[in-house]
């Protein structure tokens, strides 16, 4: 009986072994190095039934939430309840918490208030109240504060922290017809908060992985906020033997656990003991969370892999700071047999964490691991083999397959993967006549933190004379920014017989816009550096092939109008001085500059008209010249001349008779010659 019973026991244990998570063995070697309860500022957010507490100042918005009281109250009334769900398990020490609520009193001398702030943690409750008759809120803005004593207690991972503000009495002093008391929270200007001391997270050190001379040292962050712990924290640094480890770490996530892995290349070789310190600045202005431990490692001189940790799990696309993005767009407008044709080349140069994620994803094309994000699993294997996949290098077949499938998967990949609105950035994929996608690895085919360039070449037929959006705000805002800096450079050019008219550039100081018109075409440019992900902008224009707006036509008409007007002025000044008119030739380059800078036709016409009027007025007002007008033919003999005593105009004496009277050719006065 013993043998069958023992056999059954072994079979049951064998069947249960696969149920043990694969990472559990590794996790048993992880060392908890931090943290006990720490001070933290919990900001009030939300409205109505969605009020909450958050430790992340980046979640504060631009507009404040509020509750308004316009009449006095004499019975208890709840003004709001904010919740921090699922606090981290641990011991909350005995301490004093401070609740500060922003307020504004308007159209009254002030408000006398009797209020209570209550904190509920699990089944425990702690409160503090204003002193009856002594709490007066003066007109204007200020802060209503409560110091709440909290006793030591232990929380589980399912405990909530609730903060409630109630008022027992509110009395307006010298109120006006629209007296009001507003309590404000949830914005950068009105950052009402609760300063508490609670367990925030656990920091664990992972047993280092050695690959030749490279040592991969990882830190695990376990917290109730998951990815936000790393994405919204101020900073995290790692030191080995007292020296900070440089380079960009690799971040991965599993559930609410975030793993950050650094590559350390300072090993001496062979067996050695290293001391590892980690420091997490979870919140600005609060003490850093620190932990340390020691590890025994053995390294070799055989070199490492790629010099960068290759994670088995999908890396994060952002560490909270975001990656650098450079967008370059070249647009060419031409006249096609079927209409106006727009040829466009959009180049995205991506760096930092996002570039590493893209390389890792390309090296996993065709991977059917259900843990991967849908963006990666959407790519089919195609000709990519198991030998090519997960090789730590991007083979030509992987790059080619990625380019081929991006023709159809591009909108999803850009919008969901890169956080870029594909239609605002490139246009509608459905309307392209041609589309080509190219990947440039910038000389590095390993899965490392190195820039990646995506190039989209498209052609599209567009209607003549209708507004066309060249670019629009294309960044999809994220709670944790995917992009730290965004640089944009757009250049659009037309031919001699096509043009961009009625341009509407972005109404923002963040952009530089210019338009240059030459006989050979127009050159439109838009550039910006360090765009914010929340920047709203658009550049719209009307492409046209109308000869009335064509650069060649506009140039010819402008010069024809100027030369015609000047020719008339010369005709009008045949018998007058032209020295001033010649000085006024400076109006020609001024008017041509108006044309070259791409001003609308109306402005060019006004400039030509002003130049013509100035020339003609000058021609009429210039003094007359003596003798015959310029270009006049000589008639009869060559008579002697005398100047007019009044206007000094030279007049011919055509008779020898004396006395001789004749009219001055200049002023028409009668001149009498007696000798």
Image (spheres, rainbow, N blue to C red):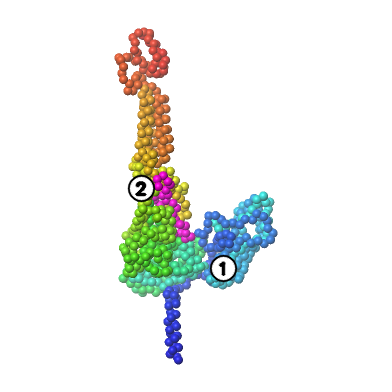
Q: CA distance from mark 2 to mark 1?
A: 65 Å
The dot on residue 349 is none
Q: Nearer the viewer, residue 598 or 5?
A: 5
Point 33% across, 61% down: residue: 400
| Left or right placement of residue 212 versus residue 5 in this view | left
Q: Residues within 10 Å of mark 1 (few under 14, many from 20)?
A: some
Task: Tell me which numbered mark, 2 or 1, is placed earlier along the sequence.
Answer: 1
Point 41% across, 58% down: residue: 411
Residue 7 occupies quadrant:
bottom left
Q: Nearer the viewer, residue 20 or 205?
A: 20
**Is label 2 or label 1 in front?**
2
Q: Is residue 486 magenta?
A: yes
Residue 656 occupies quadrant:
top left
Q: Position of residue 251 (x, y in %)?
A: 42, 65
Q: Quadrant of the C terminus?
A: top left
Point 47% across, 60% down: residue: 480
Secondary structure at badge 2 equals loop
Q: Which residues are magenta?
A: 463-491
Vertical side of 51 occupied by 36: above or below? below
Q: Nearer the viewer, residue 545 or 24?
A: 545
**Which residue is labeled 2 in the image?**
338
**Which residue is labeled 1 in the image?**
160
Q: Position of residue 184 (x, y in %)?
A: 59, 56
């Amino acid at each position: 009986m013993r043998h069958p019973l023992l056999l059954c026991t072994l079979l049951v244990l064998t069947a249960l072994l696969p149920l043990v998570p694969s990472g559990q063995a590794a996790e048993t070697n992880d060392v908890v190095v931090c943290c006990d309860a720490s001070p933290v500022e919990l900001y009030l957010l939300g409205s109505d039934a969605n009020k909450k507490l958050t430790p992340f100042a980046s979640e504060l918005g631009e507009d404040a939430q509020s509750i308004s009281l316009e009449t006095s109250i004499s019975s208890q009334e709840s003004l709001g309840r904010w919740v921090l769900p699922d606090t981290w398990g641990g011991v909350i020490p005995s301490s004093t918490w401070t609740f500060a609520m922003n307020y504004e009193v308007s159209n009254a001398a002030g408000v006398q208030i009797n209020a209570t702030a209550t904190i509920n943690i699990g089944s425990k409750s702690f409160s503090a109240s204003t002193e009856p008759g002594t709490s007066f809120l003066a007109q204007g803005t200020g802060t209503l504060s409560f110091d709440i004593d909290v006793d030591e207690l232990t929380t589980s991972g399912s405990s909530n922290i609730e903060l409630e503000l109630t008022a027992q009495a509110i009395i307006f002093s010298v109120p006006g017809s629209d007296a009001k008391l507003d309590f404000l929270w949830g914005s950068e200007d009105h950052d009402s908060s609760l300063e508490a001391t609670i367990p925030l997270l656990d920091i664990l050190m992972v047993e280092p992985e050695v690959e030749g001379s490279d040592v991969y040292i990882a830190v695990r962050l376990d917290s109730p906020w998951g990815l936000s712990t790393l994405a919204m924290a101020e900073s995290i640094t790692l030191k080995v033997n007292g020296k900070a480890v440089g380079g960009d770490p690799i971040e991965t996530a599993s559930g609410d656990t975030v793993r950050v892995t650094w590559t350390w290349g300072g090993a001496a070789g062979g067996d050695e003991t290293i001391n590892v310190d980690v420091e997490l600045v979870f919140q600005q202005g609060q003490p850093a969370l620190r932990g340390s431990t020691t590890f025994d490692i053995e390294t070799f001189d055989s070199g490492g892999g790629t010099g960068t940790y290759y994670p088995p799990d999908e890396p994060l696309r952002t560490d909270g700071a975001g990656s650098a993005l450079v967008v370059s767009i070249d647009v060419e407008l031409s006249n096609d047999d079927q209409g106006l044709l727009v040829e466009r080349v959009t180049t995205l140069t991506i760096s930092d964490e996002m570039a590493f994620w893209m390389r890792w994803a390309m090296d996993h094309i065709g991977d059917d691991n259900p843990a991967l994000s849908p963006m990666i699993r959407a790519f089919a294997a195609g000709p990519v083999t198991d030998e090519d996949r997960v090789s730590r290098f991007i083979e030509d077949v992987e790059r080619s397959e990625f380019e081929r499938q991006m023709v159809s998967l591009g909108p999803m990949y850009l919008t969901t993967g890169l956080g870029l609105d594909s239609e605002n950035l490139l246009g509608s994929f459905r309307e392209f006549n041609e589309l080509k996608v190219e990947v440039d690895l910038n000389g590095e085919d390993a899965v490392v933190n190195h820039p990646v360039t995506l190039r989209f070449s498209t052609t599209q037929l567009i209607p003549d004379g209708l507004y066309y959006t060249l670019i629009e705000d294309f960044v999809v805002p994220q709670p944790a920014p995917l992009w730290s800096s965004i640089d944009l450079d757009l250049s659009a050019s037309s031919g001699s017989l096509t043009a961009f008219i009625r341009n509407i550039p972005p109404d923002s100081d963040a952009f530089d816009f210019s338009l240059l018109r030459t006989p050979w075409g127009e050159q439109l440019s838009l550039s910006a550096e360090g765009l914010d992900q929340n920047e709203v902008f658009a550049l719209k224009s009307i492409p046209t092939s109308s000869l009335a707006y064509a650069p060649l036509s506009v140039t010819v008409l402008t010069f024809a109008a100027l030369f015609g007007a000047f020719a008339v002025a010369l005709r009008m000044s045949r018998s007058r001085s032209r020295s001033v008119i010649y000085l006024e030739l400076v109006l020609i380059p001024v008017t041509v500059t108006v044309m070259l800078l791409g001003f609308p036709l109306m402005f060019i016409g006004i400039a030509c008209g002003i130049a013509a009027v100035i020339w003609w007025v000058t021609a009429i007002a210039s003094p007359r010249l003596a003798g015959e007008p310029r270009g006049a033919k000589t008639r009869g003999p060559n008579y002697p001349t005398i100047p007019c005593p009044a206007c000094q105009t030279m007049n011919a004496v055509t008779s020898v008779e004396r006395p001789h009277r004749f009219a001055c050719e200049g002023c028409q006065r009668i001149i009498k010659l007696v000798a």
